[in-house]
Amino acid sequence: MPATKDDPTSAIPPTSLDGQPLDLGAITPELTEWDQRAYRRITSTQLSPEQTVRIVTPDQTYPRQEAVLAIHWHPEWIPIELTMARVGAMFPNATDRLIIPTQHNQIMALDGYAGVEVDCYSSGFNRKVQLLLHFRADKVAGAEVLKSMLLHTFKYRSGQLFEFMASITDPALEDRLQQAAAETGASQELVDFTRLHTAKLQKLVEANESTTPPEMIKNKLLAEYFDALREHHPARVINRVQMLIKAVKQIVKRNFSLAYFYRASEVIEEVRAVGGGIVIPHPEQFWPILLADYDVDGYEVWNPQSREYTEFLIKVVNRENKVVRPDRRKLLLCMGDDTHMSEKAKEPALQDRAKASREVGLQPVWDEVSIRKTLMLAGVDRSSVIEEYKARLA
């Protein structure tokens, strides 16, 4: 594999610092005190003073932005009040805002509104899709059916971690690991190294599952465990491992059973029953959802992960809105920063730079000249979306 700009040593086979092959025999299968300490650290929801400072202190401020629209972001295990301190510092002159947290499959509330990003199943396209759900907080209190659906989905999604680890350690799933190794150019030595340490994490999860916060049982736990191992192994070895396990994760996601997700139409029905709003996130998933013609309030036409089709999608939604349909309200144009707040708690050297750069309420394309012209033709800006969506959630 050729060297990359970010990792100029990636073309070098993984070895120890002295140039010798990895000593796989030195990796004991038994859990050590270090393993237990590392596990407690990466699953802890307690913030150090240094982490708190990192979270509340933004890298930049935007004093000219007066409207803040943030209806697609993930608090994860970071206290919402710390996130709001960061947002306040970023947009010191904002007078108009709609900020609703959208944790994966867990309803959370802020300033009278509640939200969640739910995984569900589109039967027409035989694929998992996601919906952003938003409510007035007092209305969601009695939504027992919806809450039970979300709890079921939360538990099922958490199970993906176990399949992820098994895809690395279980001989019956060896084809997945070998496929990922081929995709990333990983040597057999690196594969064996990854398998041995993943088996140790499996033991740690099993031994500590009853005391581990449920929100920490997720796919990224494996990546964070290997990051902790940088204390004992060269950075370029761990960097190559991270490439390998990321490839495995994508294979797991493609093969993960959809059988236990609720259908999108069922979720939409429950949301409408309690007066909630629905936005389709992720432009790269836009096409099948648009064709399905679901009863939704709007579409996310920009996300940090997808910028390519923004202008075109704005025009598509604008064209749809010109078609008079008494059974459907105007579709809203939304943008999602898709911020994951736990990324900001990590030491800067261990952060995913792309994810760490995301900020709640920061969607710069609103102000790009070409996009702003298209939005003006549609009669849309941040403030108009905030006003209209608040009215629908009232």
Image: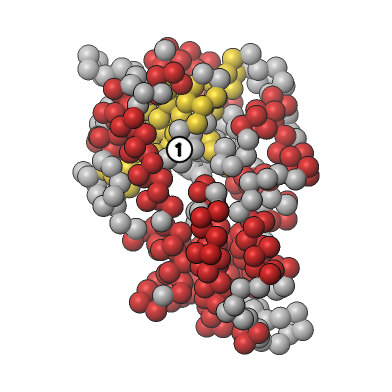
* Residue 248 percent location from the top left of the image: 46, 66
* Residue 124 percent location from the top left of the image: 21, 43
- Picture residue at 77% right of the left edge, 39% below the top: 53
Secondary structure at badge 1 equals loop
**Quadrant containing the C terminus in the rendered view:** top left
In the image, 45 versus 65, the foreground residue is 45
In the image, 364 versus 165, the foreground residue is 165
Looking at the picture, the colour scheme in use is secondary structure
In the image, 145 versus 310, the foreground residue is 145
* Residue 342 percent location from the top left of the image: 62, 45
Number of numbered callouts drawn: 1
Amino acid type for the residue under numbered disc 1: Gln
- Picture residue at 40% right of the left edge, 19% below the top: 139
- Picture residue at 33% right of the left edge, 61% below the top: 255
Query: In the picture provided, is 121 more to the left or to the right than 138?
Result: left
Query: In the picture provided, is 273 more to the left or to the right than 89?
Result: left
In the image, 114 versus 356, the foreground residue is 114
* Residue 361 percent location from the top left of the image: 59, 29
Residue 66, compared with residue 52, is above or below; it is above
Residue 242 appearing in the image: yes
Query: In the picture provided, is 178 more to the left or to the right than 304?
Result: left
| Residue 123, image quadrant | top left
| Residue 196, image quadrant | bottom right
Q: Residues within 10 Å of mark 1 (few under 14, many from 20)?
A: some
Residue 344, compared with residue 169, is above or below; it is above
| Residue 316, image quadrant | top left
Residue 374 appearing in the image: no
**Quadrant containing the N terminus in the rendered view:** bottom right
Residue 262, compared with residue 242, is above or below; it is above
- Picture residue at 47% right of the left edge, 66% below the top: 165
Residue ID for mark 1: 106
